[in-house]
Image (cartoon, rainbow, N blue to C red):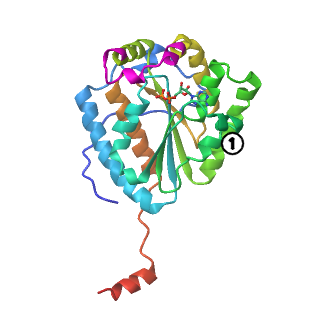
């Protein structure tokens, strides 16, 4: 692996996976960490982690035994785009695959809900990220009552089976719920109104979803607890503070990639022999 001089700022902060038995706290207070280090410290620590991520990716790509898939979920303005830009920006774009999921098309609706998702799962050697995902099918679909209860209820098990199958085929899955408070979302949505370069991001549906805050909280709580497994865990990321959010996601990705101990394949003997005669 490429040697990167990493002076890691020693921070005790790390994400903990959601466990099925735990009650996930999704109140406004859980969107913040009062004892978080200040912005400069977090940014320095994150930049060290990003350098490490770039080096790990190089070996991960060459190694080719696994794919990595990060699933990002969160309410509007929770920072999904921000994480992709700030954290995934560290990677060599050649080895990265980004997929975003908006409302399904007419054709997608005629298929099972995982059809469009499976097609864009990263292949081995690649690091992928989903901006929203199949979880919308137990979140937006549930809250906006787009399908009968029996249909979305059955999906928790279907999602677990799907992710289990992917894991068994070399796809390492990590899932982050970017958790913002109601006040922070309000401030960010208002900023979109004030800033002409962000006006286009503002949508009326976002306000309808905001009005259903508690319904979404309940839907997230059930999805997070029922679909967090040892092989495809969910993490709740306190996301009111952007610097902290980026640090926590970057750290989790470094820990994940390091746990896979990616290594460069040795040169095959035939190639070595041929190379000896290379002029
Ligand atoms: P974003 O708001 O994330 O920038 P889009 O406006 O393209 O991106 O699409 C997001 C919207 O699509 C969200 O309101 C989300 O709930 C909705 N969506 C995504 N997947 C589904 C789905 N399977 N069923 C219904 N709505 C969905």
- Depth check, front residue: 278 or 217: 278
Residue 45 sits in quarter: top left
- Depth check, front residue: 110 or 135: 110
Q: Residues within 10 Å of mark 1 (few under 14, many from 20)?
A: few
- Residue 168 in view of the camera: yes
Where residue 13 sits in the image (x, y, percent)?
Answer: 37, 31
Q: Is residue 205 magenta?
A: yes
- Residue 20 in view of the camera: no
Residue 225 sits in quarter: top right
Secondary structure type for disc 1? helix
Where residue 39 sits in the image (x, y, percent)?
Answer: 26, 27
Name the quarter where the C terminus is drawn. bottom left
Q: What number of labels is visible?
A: 1
Where residue 112 sits in the image (x, y, percent)?
Answer: 70, 38
> Outermost residue toward the right?
150
- Ligand 1 resides in the quarter of the picture at top right
Identify the residue at horizontal 62%, vertical 33% (top origin).
227
Q: What residue does disc 1 label?
A: 161
Q: Is residue 226 left or right of residue 244?
A: right
Where residue 102 sits in the image (x, y, percent)?
Answer: 54, 31
Q: Magenta region's main secondary structure?
A: helix
> Outermost residue toward the bottom?
277
- Is residue 230 depicted above or below 56 in this figure? above
Identify the residue at horizontal 55%, vertical 23% (top origin).
24
Name the quarter where the N terminus is drawn. bottom left
Q: Which residues are magenta?
A: 193-208
- Depth check, front residue: 268 or 73: 73
């Amino acid at each position: 692996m490429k040697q990167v001089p990493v002076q890691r700022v020693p921070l005790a902060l790390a994400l903990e996976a959601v466990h099925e038995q735990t009650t996930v706290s999704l109140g406004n207070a859980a969107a913040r960490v009062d004892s978080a280090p200040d912005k400069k410290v977090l940014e320095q620590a994150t930049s060290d982690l990003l350098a490490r991520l770039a080096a790990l990716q190089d070996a991960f790509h060459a190694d080719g035994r696994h794919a990595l898939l990060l699933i990002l979920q969160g309410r509007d303005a929770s920072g999904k785009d921000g994480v992709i830009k700030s954290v995934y920006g560290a990677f060599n774009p050649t080895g990265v695959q980004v997929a975003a999921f908006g409302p399904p098309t007419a054709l997608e609706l005629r298929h099972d809900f995982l059809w469009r998702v499976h097609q864009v799962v990263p292949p081995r050697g690649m690091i992928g990220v989903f901006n929203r995902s199949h979880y919308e099918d137990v979140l937006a679909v549930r809250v906006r009552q787009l399908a009968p209860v029996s249909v979305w209820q059955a999906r928790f098990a279907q999602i677990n089976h799907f992710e289990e199958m992917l894991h068994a085929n070399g796809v390492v899955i990590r899932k982050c719920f970017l958790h913002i408070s109601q006040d922070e979302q309000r401030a960010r949505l208002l900023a979109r109104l004030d800033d002409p370069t962000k006006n286009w991001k503002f949508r009326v549906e976002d306000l309808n979803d905001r009005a259903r805050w508690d319904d979404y909280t309940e839907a997230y709580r059930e999805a997070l607890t029922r679909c967090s497994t040892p092989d495809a865990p969910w993490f709740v990321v306190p996301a009111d503070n952007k610097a902290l959010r980026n640090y926590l996601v970057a750290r989790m990705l470094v820990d994940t990639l390091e746990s896979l101990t990616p290594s460069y394949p040795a040169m095959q003997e035939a190639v070595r022999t041929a190379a000896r005669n290379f002029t």
